[in-house]
Image: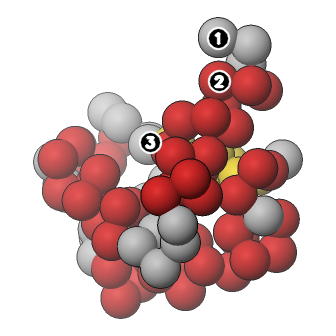
Amino acid sequence: MTKISGLGTFTRSCNVEEWCPIVECAVDTFGPARCLFGSNFPIEKLWTSYAALIAVARTALSRYSADEQLAVLHDTAARLYRI
């Protein structure tokens, strides 16, 4: 499993151009069933809103099917954490 999280921590940014290659590399390498998205809030609140963070994550995942996106944004975490 890999958690896709805190992508803008070192650059203090939240943008598709920066995140997309990282998200795509992770999902293409591990597959959606082994990737889960996580935020780094409240730390990221210093440079972005939670709504912006989710919007960028969704855009970075937009080339994947609805089921693959759901896996990364929900299903993999639910299965891993047994919730």
Q: Does residue 80 show up?
A: yes
Q: Earlier in the sequence, mark 3 or mark 2?
A: 3
The part of the image, by quadrant, that contains residue 27 is: bottom right
**Label 2: how many Cα within 10 Å (few below 14, some 14–19, many 20+):** few
Earlier in the chain: of badge 2 and badge 1, it is 2
The residue indicated by pointer 2 is 78
**Label 3 is placed on what type of residue?**
Asn
Res 7 visible: no
- Residue 83 left/right relative to 30: left
Query: For mark 3, what is the residue?
Result: 40
Name the amino acid type tagged 1: Ile
In three-dimensional space, the C-alpha distance between marks 3 and 1, rounded to whole angstroms, equals: 20 Å
Residue at x 70% of width, y 58% of height: 32
CA distance for labels 3 and 2: 18 Å
Which residue is denoted by mark 1 in the rendering? 83
Q: Nearer the viewer, residue 51 or 79?
A: 79
Q: Position of residue 15 (x, y in %)?
A: 28, 76
- Quick one: which residue is furthest to the top in this view? 83
Q: Amino acid at mark 2?
A: Ala
Report whether 56 appears left or right of 34: left
Give how far across and how far down residue 39 sits, in percent.
44, 43
Residue at disc 2, secondary structure: helix
Name the front one of labels 3 and 2: 2
Q: Residue at x 76, y 50 (%)?
A: 33
Q: Quadrant of the C terminus?
A: top right
